[in-house]
Amino acid sequence: MRCDVLTLFPGMISSVLDESIIKRAIDKGLLEVRVINIRDFTFDKHHTADDSPYGGGAGMVLKAEPILRAVAHIGEGDKDLRIILLSPQGKRYSQEIAYDLSQEKRRILFICGHYEGIDERVRIYLKPEEISIGDYVLTGGELAALVIIDSTVRLIEGVLGDISSAEEESFNRLLDYPHYTRPSELMGMKVPDVLLSGNHEEIRLWRKRQKLVNTLRKRPDLLSTVELSEEEKDLLGEIREEESI
Ligand code: ADE
């Protein structure tokens, strides 16, 4: 995956890129991120990136020209860009969008808004996709861009040690099953016997059951959106009976 992040706060992005799985993906050449400072595309001596809103009101508005100049500059090197504007007005981000982005062949350009908003002409001229990571307002798009990069990069083949670990877990369909590691007993809390049994079929069934239990208890709304296998339907019937749900 190749992406550019257009931001007023490049340090916010770089510091996260320099850690953990994202860093490893970059080192392996599976992810390329260029962090571009919007201020480098301002044209006055004070490098002004914001201004007061026409019509009055509180706060500042991110100017359109530096952003449009930066995008034109990036577009000179790469005509085929997928432009994403991070904003609370966007389409709600989901695992489905993460999968889609992880398969994207075009360079992805994330534009991070700031202040009270961004000059509307950025939307009018670039017609970007607009993505929100949730119904709350952040101080800027940087954390949203990082959430998207982080959740997308782990779906790229070769980034996680075992690709099935990304595929198997939460939000693929159902919530995840509980995980345990050594010691087998901690402050009186024991690891379920089945996980120590070495019986792979029983472990598989236990995990499947626990996924359903977790989903039913924590996110029952998901059960109406996934297609269950016959085995899962039977297990769910049993669980519902036991738990009287
Ligand atoms: N910028 C400010 N709030 C945001 C949100 N919820 N999602 C994406 N970008 C944002």
Image (spheres, helix red, strand yellow):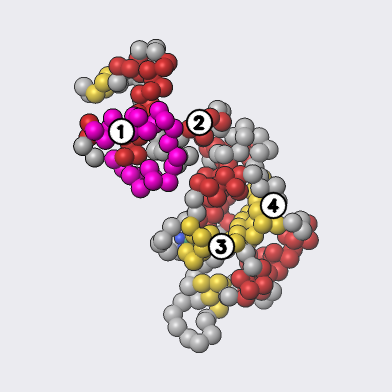
Kind of element beneath mark 2: helix
Q: Amino acid at mark 2?
A: Ser
Give the camera-side residue of 73 and 228: 228
Give the labeled residue for mark 2: 165
Q: Earlier in the sequence, mark 1 or mark 3?
A: 3
- N-term mark: 4 or 3: 4
Badge nearest the viewer, 2 or 1: 1
Q: Would you place residue 132 above or below residue 203 in this image?
A: below
Instruction: Find the magenta span and give its range.
Output: 217-241
Pointers 4 and 2 in contact (C-beta within 8 Å): no
Vertical placement of residue 184 versus 40, above or below: above
Residue 163's quadrant in the figure?
A: top right
Q: Amino acid at mark 3?
A: Glu
- The residue nearer to you, when weighing 41 against 207, is 207
How far apart in space, not on screen, are marks 2 and 3 (Cα)? 29 Å
User: Distance between the Cα atoms at labels 4 and 2?
Assistant: 26 Å
Choose mark 1 or mark 4, whichever is in front: 1
Residue 233 shown in magenta: yes
User: How much space separates mark 1 and mark 4, taking CA atoms?
Assistant: 46 Å
Q: Mark 3 — residue?
A: 130
72 within the magenta span:
no
Q: Are marks 1 and 3 in contact (CB under 8 Å)?
A: no
Question: Which callout, 1 or 4, points at the residue further toward the start of the chain?
Answer: 4
Residue 107, which numbered label? 4
Residue at screen point 53% across, 47% down: 96
Read off the residue under disc 1: 237
Residue at 68%, 38% in the rendered image: 29
Element carrying mark 1: helix
Residue 222 % position (x, y): 39, 45
State the image quarter where residue 36 is shown.
bottom right
Q: Amino acid at mark 1?
A: Gly
